[in-house]
């Protein structure tokens, strides 16, 4: 298991969605407010064909089509255009307004998990701290201004975790070697496998205490971000 020299750790990178905040919750909440607004503009019979799960499906289809060619905010706008097309309602201005409303709530209504600020408060004095996300949650929009020394979004690098390039790019930006980096995230496939792949220290944040049914072996497994301080001896 832990064959790494933990004394050499200089940099700690965190995944965003489901690690620092519950993305699923804020996404559904924001879609629900957007759907309410849509219902104010579209005849009941047409709007009745929509629900949140359908809107998520539309967005995921658009994301799969445009992966690597559009950023997440453009994908979301096209998803609202496509949602209106689905109910045969042509109104590009409404699609743009719905997108603005969605993005406002999606960014402003994020709730951090309760262990985030207490954990970061201890770690930030000793380590360079980064956000390393396949999503687009900006720290300054959700109460995390000043905590991160660097922020890396896969949509800016052109590849997503677990691709090695995103972790190597993190090391370049943070000025460290892979073995001096500890990466923490909720996904075995993206976060743990990606960190393992470049020789960084991986931490699986398993908030719900799920069984690891994969072949992917994290260097450490934790259930709360407060446990990070024990791993790094702070
Ligand atoms: Mg995640």
Image: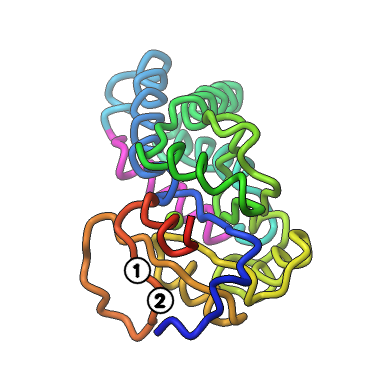
Contact check, label 2 and label 1, Cβ < 8 Å: yes
Left or right, 99 with reference to 186: right
Q: Which residues are magenta?
A: 49-65
Left or right, 224 with reference to 203: left
Image: 181 above or below 125: below
Check the image and name the residue furthest to the top: 40
User: x, y (%) of residue 12?
Assistant: 58, 58
User: Which secondary structure lies at badge 2?
Assistant: loop
Left or right, 210 with reference to 54: left
Q: Specify the label residue 67 is tagged with.
A: none
Image: 224 above or below 203: above
Q: Nearer the viewer, residue 51 or 121?
A: 121
User: x, y (%) of residue 4?
Assistant: 53, 81
User: x, y (%) of residue 88?
Assistant: 44, 34
Residue at image mark 1: 221
Quarter of the image for residue 52 reads: top left
Image: 110 above or below 122: above
Magenta: predominant secondary structure element? Answer: helix
Q: Is residue 59 magenta?
A: yes
Q: Quadrant of ligand 1?
A: bottom left
User: x, y (%) of residue 60?
Assistant: 45, 53
Q: Nearer the viewer, residue 140 or 180?
A: 180
Residue at image mark 2: 218
């Amino acid at each position: 298991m832990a064959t790494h020299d933990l004394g050499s750790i200089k940099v700690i990178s965190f995944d965003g969605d489901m690690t620092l905040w519950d993305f699923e919750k804020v996404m559904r909440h924001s879609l629900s407010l957007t759907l309410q607004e849509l219902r104010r503009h579209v005849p009941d019979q047409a709007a009745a064909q929509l629900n949140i799960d359908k809107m998520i499906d539309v967005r995921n289809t658009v994301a799969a089509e445009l992966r690597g060619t559009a950023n997440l905010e453009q994908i979301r706008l096209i998803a609202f255009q496509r949602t209106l097309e689905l109910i045969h309602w042509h109104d590009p201005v409404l699609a743009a307004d719905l997108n603005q409303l969605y993005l406002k709530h999606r960014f402003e209504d994020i709730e951090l998990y309760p262990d985030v600020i207490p954990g970061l408060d201890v770690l930030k004095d000793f380590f360079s701290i980064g956000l390393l996300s396949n999503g687009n949650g900006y720290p300054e929009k959700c109460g995390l201004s000043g905590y991160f020394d660097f922020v890396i979004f896969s949509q800016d690098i052109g590849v997503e975790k677990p691709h090695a390039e995103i972790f190597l790019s993190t090391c370049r930006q943070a000025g460290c070697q892979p073995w001096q980096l500890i990466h923490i995230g909720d996904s075995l496939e993206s976060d743990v496998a990606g960190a393992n792949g470049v020789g960084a220290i991986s931490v699986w944040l398993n908030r719900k205490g799920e069984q690891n049914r994969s072949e992917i072996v994290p260097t450490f497994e934790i259930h709360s971000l407060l446990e990070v301080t024990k791993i790094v001896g702070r």
